[in-house]
Image (cartoon, rainbow, N blue to C red):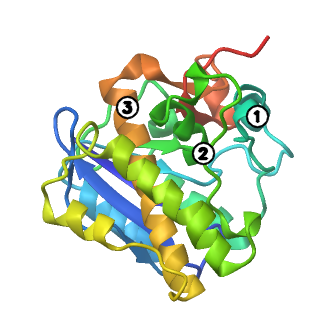
Amino acid sequence: MRFLGVDLAWKDGNPSGVALLAGQRFPLRLREIPHSLGRHEDVLGWIARHVARHRASVAIDAPLLGLGTGRRICDNEISSRFGRFHASTHSPPRYPGLDAFIAALLSAYPLESFGPAWQPRSACPAIREIYPNALQVLLFTLDRTPGLTIVKYKQRHFGDRRRWVERGLRPFIERCATALGGRYVVTGDTAWRALVALRPSASMSGAELKSIEDRWDAILCAVGAALEFFQKPSMRFYPDGAEAWRSGFILAPALPCPR
Protein backbone atom coordinates (compact mmCIF):
# COMPACT_ATOMS: atom_id res chain seq x y z
CA MET A 1 0.00 0.00 0.00
CA ARG A 2 1.30 3.45 -0.87
CA PHE A 3 0.41 6.70 0.83
CA LEU A 4 1.01 9.92 -1.06
CA GLY A 5 1.07 13.26 0.71
CA VAL A 6 0.72 16.50 -1.23
CA ASP A 7 1.06 19.96 0.27
CA LEU A 8 -0.53 21.61 -2.74
CA ALA A 9 0.22 25.20 -3.69
CA TRP A 10 -3.24 26.59 -4.33
CA LYS A 11 -1.80 28.90 -6.99
CA ASP A 12 -0.38 27.00 -9.96
CA GLY A 13 3.29 27.83 -10.49
CA ASN A 14 4.13 27.91 -6.80
CA PRO A 15 5.99 24.82 -5.52
CA SER A 16 4.06 21.95 -3.94
CA GLY A 17 5.60 19.51 -1.45
CA VAL A 18 5.24 15.77 -2.04
CA ALA A 19 6.06 12.72 0.08
CA LEU A 20 5.63 8.99 -0.55
CA LEU A 21 5.30 6.34 2.16
CA ALA A 22 4.80 2.63 1.59
CA GLY A 23 4.30 -0.54 3.60
CA GLN A 24 1.78 -2.95 5.11
CA ARG A 25 1.83 -1.51 8.62
CA PHE A 26 3.50 1.18 10.71
CA PRO A 27 6.31 2.16 10.60
CA LEU A 28 6.27 2.92 6.88
CA ARG A 29 9.22 3.59 4.61
CA LEU A 30 9.88 6.75 2.69
CA ARG A 31 10.17 5.55 -0.91
CA GLU A 32 11.96 8.71 -2.04
CA ILE A 33 13.30 11.90 -0.50
CA PRO A 34 10.39 14.34 -0.05
CA HIS A 35 10.74 17.21 -2.47
CA SER A 36 8.92 20.04 -4.26
CA LEU A 37 7.25 20.13 -7.67
CA GLY A 38 6.83 23.36 -9.56
CA ARG A 39 3.51 22.98 -11.36
CA HIS A 40 0.14 21.35 -10.78
CA GLU A 41 0.67 19.21 -13.86
CA ASP A 42 3.86 17.89 -12.27
CA VAL A 43 1.90 16.94 -9.14
CA LEU A 44 -0.76 15.17 -11.21
CA GLY A 45 1.93 13.27 -13.10
CA TRP A 46 3.70 12.31 -9.87
CA ILE A 47 0.43 10.97 -8.43
CA ALA A 48 -0.40 9.01 -11.59
CA ARG A 49 3.05 7.46 -11.71
CA HIS A 50 3.00 6.23 -8.13
CA VAL A 51 -0.56 4.86 -8.09
CA ALA A 52 -0.45 3.14 -11.48
CA ARG A 53 0.58 -0.28 -10.16
CA HIS A 54 -0.17 -0.02 -6.46
CA ARG A 55 -3.09 0.34 -4.11
CA ALA A 56 -2.76 3.83 -2.75
CA SER A 57 -4.32 6.69 -0.85
CA VAL A 58 -3.55 10.27 -1.85
CA ALA A 59 -3.93 12.93 0.86
CA ILE A 60 -3.91 16.52 -0.36
CA ASP A 61 -3.77 19.67 1.73
CA ALA A 62 -6.11 21.76 -0.42
CA PRO A 63 -9.89 22.17 -0.75
CA LEU A 64 -11.12 19.56 -3.21
CA LEU A 65 -14.92 19.35 -3.18
CA GLY A 66 -17.68 21.84 -2.50
CA LEU A 67 -15.93 24.93 -3.82
CA GLY A 68 -18.05 27.81 -5.03
CA THR A 69 -20.61 27.40 -2.25
CA GLY A 70 -19.01 29.74 0.27
CA ARG A 71 -17.68 28.43 3.53
CA ARG A 72 -18.24 24.69 3.68
CA ILE A 73 -19.75 22.62 6.48
CA CYS A 74 -16.48 20.70 6.84
CA ASP A 75 -14.55 23.94 7.43
CA ASN A 76 -16.97 24.93 10.18
CA GLU A 77 -16.79 21.50 11.81
CA ILE A 78 -12.99 21.47 11.82
CA SER A 79 -12.92 24.96 13.32
CA SER A 80 -15.42 23.88 15.99
CA ARG A 81 -13.42 20.76 16.97
CA PHE A 82 -9.89 22.07 16.57
CA GLY A 83 -10.20 25.80 17.12
CA ARG A 84 -9.21 25.50 20.76
CA PHE A 85 -5.87 24.11 19.57
CA HIS A 86 -5.47 27.09 17.18
CA ALA A 87 -6.13 24.77 14.21
CA SER A 88 -9.17 26.40 12.62
CA THR A 89 -9.48 26.41 8.83
CA HIS A 90 -9.63 29.31 6.40
CA SER A 91 -12.48 29.72 3.95
CA PRO A 92 -11.57 28.03 0.65
CA PRO A 93 -10.09 30.42 -1.92
CA ARG A 94 -10.92 30.52 -5.61
CA TYR A 95 -7.93 30.23 -7.91
CA PRO A 96 -8.42 29.25 -11.57
CA GLY A 97 -5.41 26.95 -11.28
CA LEU A 98 -6.90 25.19 -8.25
CA ASP A 99 -10.19 24.66 -10.06
CA ALA A 100 -8.28 23.20 -13.01
CA PHE A 101 -6.31 20.88 -10.71
CA ILE A 102 -9.53 19.56 -9.13
CA ALA A 103 -11.11 19.10 -12.54
CA ALA A 104 -8.07 17.09 -13.65
CA LEU A 105 -8.32 14.88 -10.55
CA LEU A 106 -12.01 14.24 -11.21
CA SER A 107 -11.22 13.44 -14.81
CA ALA A 108 -8.50 10.96 -13.87
CA TYR A 109 -10.25 9.28 -10.91
CA PRO A 110 -13.92 8.54 -10.15
CA LEU A 111 -15.81 10.84 -7.81
CA GLU A 112 -16.53 7.85 -5.56
CA SER A 113 -12.78 7.55 -4.88
CA PHE A 114 -13.11 10.68 -2.74
CA GLY A 115 -15.67 8.98 -0.50
CA PRO A 116 -15.08 7.02 2.74
CA ALA A 117 -16.35 3.71 1.30
CA TRP A 118 -13.86 3.59 -1.58
CA GLN A 119 -11.56 0.57 -1.66
CA PRO A 120 -8.39 1.59 -3.54
CA ARG A 121 -6.93 -0.58 -6.29
CA SER A 122 -4.18 -0.16 -8.82
CA ALA A 123 -4.60 3.09 -10.79
CA CYS A 124 -7.69 3.99 -8.71
CA PRO A 125 -6.46 5.42 -5.38
CA ALA A 126 -8.47 6.87 -2.57
CA ILE A 127 -8.38 10.68 -2.72
CA ARG A 128 -8.52 12.62 0.53
CA GLU A 129 -8.57 16.28 1.49
CA ILE A 130 -6.57 16.58 4.70
CA TYR A 131 -5.57 19.31 7.12
CA PRO A 132 -2.08 18.87 8.64
CA ASN A 133 -2.65 21.37 11.44
CA ALA A 134 -5.46 19.21 12.82
CA LEU A 135 -3.20 16.17 12.61
CA GLN A 136 -0.80 17.84 15.06
CA VAL A 137 -3.46 17.35 17.74
CA LEU A 138 -3.24 13.57 17.36
CA LEU A 139 0.48 13.23 16.70
CA PHE A 140 1.49 15.53 19.56
CA THR A 141 -1.34 14.31 21.90
CA LEU A 142 -2.45 17.89 22.48
CA ASP A 143 -5.92 16.84 23.64
CA ARG A 144 -4.53 15.16 26.76
CA THR A 145 -3.54 18.40 28.47
CA PRO A 146 -5.88 21.41 28.61
CA GLY A 147 -4.55 24.59 27.03
CA LEU A 148 -2.04 23.08 24.59
CA THR A 149 -1.99 24.42 21.03
CA ILE A 150 -0.37 23.42 17.75
CA VAL A 151 3.14 24.47 16.86
CA LYS A 152 2.77 27.50 14.60
CA TYR A 153 5.37 27.41 11.86
CA LYS A 154 4.14 29.57 8.98
CA GLN A 155 6.18 32.69 8.25
CA ARG A 156 3.15 34.97 8.57
CA HIS A 157 3.15 34.33 12.32
CA PHE A 158 6.71 35.60 12.73
CA GLY A 159 7.62 38.00 9.94
CA ASP A 160 11.35 38.19 10.53
CA ARG A 161 13.18 35.24 8.98
CA ARG A 162 15.32 34.46 12.01
CA ARG A 163 12.29 34.45 14.31
CA TRP A 164 10.45 32.26 11.80
CA VAL A 165 13.28 29.71 11.80
CA GLU A 166 14.11 29.71 15.51
CA ARG A 167 10.62 30.02 17.00
CA GLY A 168 8.49 28.36 14.34
CA LEU A 169 9.89 26.18 11.60
CA ARG A 170 12.74 24.52 13.49
CA PRO A 171 10.65 23.60 16.58
CA PHE A 172 7.91 22.29 14.28
CA ILE A 173 10.33 20.05 12.39
CA GLU A 174 11.96 18.78 15.57
CA ARG A 175 8.54 17.97 17.03
CA CYS A 176 7.48 16.17 13.82
CA ALA A 177 10.71 14.18 13.60
CA THR A 178 10.30 13.01 17.21
CA ALA A 179 6.63 12.12 16.81
CA LEU A 180 6.96 10.37 13.45
CA GLY A 181 10.40 8.78 13.58
CA GLY A 182 10.33 5.12 14.56
CA ARG A 183 6.60 4.94 15.33
CA TYR A 184 5.17 5.95 11.97
CA VAL A 185 8.19 6.22 9.65
CA VAL A 186 11.30 4.05 9.47
CA THR A 187 14.32 6.16 10.41
CA GLY A 188 17.15 4.02 9.06
CA ASP A 189 16.52 4.74 5.40
CA THR A 190 18.56 7.14 3.30
CA ALA A 191 15.47 9.22 2.49
CA TRP A 192 14.65 9.87 6.15
CA ARG A 193 18.25 10.68 7.05
CA ALA A 194 18.47 13.11 4.13
CA LEU A 195 15.24 14.79 5.21
CA VAL A 196 16.19 15.35 8.85
CA ALA A 197 19.68 16.46 7.85
CA LEU A 198 18.18 19.38 5.93
CA ARG A 199 17.84 21.74 8.86
CA PRO A 200 16.39 25.22 8.42
CA SER A 201 18.75 28.14 8.94
CA ALA A 202 18.21 31.88 8.91
CA SER A 203 20.95 32.09 6.26
CA MET A 204 18.71 30.21 3.80
CA SER A 205 16.49 32.03 1.33
CA GLY A 206 12.77 32.25 1.91
CA ALA A 207 12.20 29.84 -0.97
CA GLU A 208 14.59 27.28 0.53
CA LEU A 209 12.87 27.49 3.90
CA LYS A 210 9.43 27.22 2.35
CA SER A 211 10.56 24.12 0.47
CA ILE A 212 11.61 22.47 3.74
CA GLU A 213 8.28 23.41 5.31
CA ASP A 214 6.34 21.98 2.36
CA ARG A 215 8.14 18.64 2.59
CA TRP A 216 7.19 18.17 6.23
CA ASP A 217 3.60 19.18 5.53
CA ALA A 218 3.54 16.56 2.78
CA ILE A 219 4.79 13.88 5.16
CA LEU A 220 2.06 14.76 7.64
CA CYS A 221 -0.49 14.41 4.83
CA ALA A 222 0.87 10.96 3.92
CA VAL A 223 0.85 9.81 7.56
CA GLY A 224 -2.74 11.03 7.91
CA ALA A 225 -3.75 8.93 4.91
CA ALA A 226 -2.04 5.90 6.44
CA LEU A 227 -3.74 6.42 9.79
CA GLU A 228 -7.13 6.15 8.10
CA PHE A 229 -6.21 2.68 6.83
CA PHE A 230 -4.12 1.28 9.67
CA GLN A 231 -5.70 2.98 12.70
CA LYS A 232 -9.18 3.67 11.36
CA PRO A 233 -10.83 4.79 14.64
CA SER A 234 -8.24 7.55 15.00
CA MET A 235 -9.41 9.40 11.86
CA ARG A 236 -12.77 10.42 10.42
CA PHE A 237 -14.42 12.49 7.73
CA TYR A 238 -15.81 15.89 8.67
CA PRO A 239 -18.77 16.12 8.18
CA ASP A 240 -19.94 12.61 9.02
CA GLY A 241 -22.63 10.77 7.10
CA ALA A 242 -22.67 8.40 4.14
CA GLU A 243 -23.14 11.09 1.47
CA ALA A 244 -22.09 14.25 3.33
CA TRP A 245 -18.60 14.15 1.81
CA ARG A 246 -19.96 15.05 -1.62
CA SER A 247 -20.37 18.68 -0.56
CA GLY A 248 -16.81 18.87 0.74
CA PHE A 249 -14.99 16.98 3.46
CA ILE A 250 -11.77 17.04 5.47
CA LEU A 251 -10.02 13.96 6.85
CA ALA A 252 -8.82 14.73 10.38
CA PRO A 253 -8.38 13.06 13.78
CA ALA A 254 -11.54 11.83 15.46
CA LEU A 255 -12.17 14.37 18.20
CA PRO A 256 -15.38 14.88 20.21
CA CYS A 257 -17.22 18.15 19.92
CA PRO A 258 -16.22 20.50 22.76
CA ARG A 259 -18.88 21.09 25.37
* Above or below, 178 relative to 232: below
Figure quadrant of residue 240: top right
Identified at 78% across, 50% down, the residue is 90
Name the residue carrying label 2: 133
Identified at 42% across, 55% down, the residue is 174
Residue 51 location (% of width, % of height):
27, 53
User: Which amino acid type is marked by label 2?
Assistant: Asn
- Quadrant of the drawing holding the C terminus: top right
Residue 26 location (% of width, % of height):
22, 34
* Above or below, 38 relative to 111: below
Q: Earlier in the sequence, mark 2 or mark 3?
A: 2
Identified at 13% across, 58% down, the residue is 189
Q: Earlier in the sequence, mark 1 or mark 3?
A: 1
* Above or below, 231 relative to 83: above
Residue 29 location (% of width, % of height):
19, 50
Name the residue carrying label 1: 83
- Quadrant of the drawing holding the N terminus: top left
- The residues bearing labels 2 and 1 have C-alpha atoms spaced at a distance of 10 Å
Mark 2 surroundings: few (<14), some (14-19) or many (≥20) residues within 10 A: many
Front in this rendered view, residue 130 or 242: 130
Name the residue carrying label 3: 227
* Above or below, 81 relative to 150: above
Figure quadrant of residue 144: top right
Question: Mark 1 or mark 3, which is nearer to you?
Answer: 1
**Is there any visible trace of residue 57 in the rendered image?**
no
Residue 199 location (% of width, % of height):
39, 72
Q: Secondary structure at mark 3?
A: helix
